[in-house]
Image: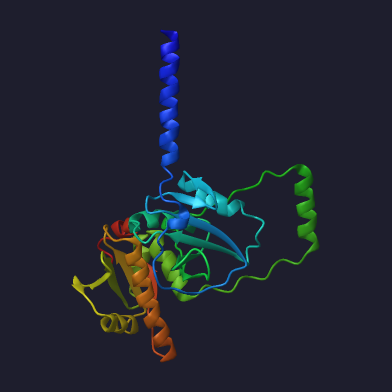
Amino acid sequence: MHNYIKRKRLLILLISVSITMSGFGQPKTKISLPKGGVERSFYGTIDFYITENQEVFSEDKRLLRYDDISNLIIMKNDIPLSERRVLLYADKNLSYSFIEKIKEEIAQVEKVLFLMTDSIAGTKKGYSIVLNSHLNRHKNIKTILTLEQEIKNQEFNESVLPPPFPPPNMWYHDFEDIIYSGKKEAIKKVLKEYSYDIIRVLPNKVLEHKEVAISSEQLKRIIKDNDILFLKFDDKSLYGDYIYAIQEIKKHQIKLKKEKENRAYLVDISLKLEKLLIGLI
């Protein structure tokens, strides 16, 4: 009887291991990236790969917690901050709502994210986006210092000139911070200061304005006529739909810049944030 129980436990263990290993499904090299993008070059990168099955990898390691993503970025201290770039290689068939969770985690520790397109191998192509932390939450891992390290740091700080004040934020970055703060009175106030309009990203690469699908030329006119363009999402939209929207908007922003015309600044409104902003935008 005892041997039977041991054999049964061993069988269960082997089945569990088999399930865990088969859970790695689609290899990261088989990720189908969205098409488009512009050529990019980088010095130091932190790369994340997401399969259609929502498996998240960094290099050859699968990450099992959202926290792992932001912690990995913080701990990657071998790349100077001025050169560090975070790259996302995500399958175009992923639900956009899942991508939002990844963006939200990265936004706690990084302001810019590069959405990579076309192919993992070869020439790097993609789009850069500015990230906004939900409710302005940020994360920072504080190192435990020995007394000797504290003394050395203090001596160093006293021996060098303080760094210059950073340049002031552009108005649209301050605008984003207020929108993502979730503070309704501040949001009401800032919305009165700038003109804005809203586009919704639907499945199958459809862009909707006031519940009507719009053409590329209509999109260009909306971008030209406003200071801010809010981008909202359908809960069934895919990551490929989002990249299509980014591509179309950036195309018109570049054209309007060459024509020396006004062009709206793009602000993503996440599904989570949209619920907080009901009645405001």
Q: Tell me residue 73's x, y (percent).
A: 56, 54
Query: Which part of the image, by quadrant, shows the C terminus?
Result: bottom left
Q: Is residue 240 above or below residue 2?
A: below
Q: How many marks?
A: 0
Taking depth in this image into account, of 97 and 120 the one nearest to the observer is 120
Q: Tell me residue 280's x, y (percent).
A: 28, 65
Q: Is residue 167 above or below residue 51?
A: below
Query: Which part of the image, by quadrant, shows the N terminus?
Result: top left
Q: Is residue 190 at least partly visible in the picture?
A: no
Taking depth in this image into account, of 89 and 216 the one nearest to the observer is 89
Q: Residue at x 69, y 67 (%)?
A: 163
Q: Residue at x 39, y 89 (%)?
A: 261
Q: Tell me residue 144's x, y (percent).
A: 67, 43
Looking at the picture, the colour scheme in use is: rainbow
Extreme residue in the left direction: 212
Q: Residue at x 58, y 53 (%)?
A: 74
Taking depth in this image into account, of 22 and 89 the one nearest to the observer is 22
Q: Quadrant of residue 82?
A: bottom right
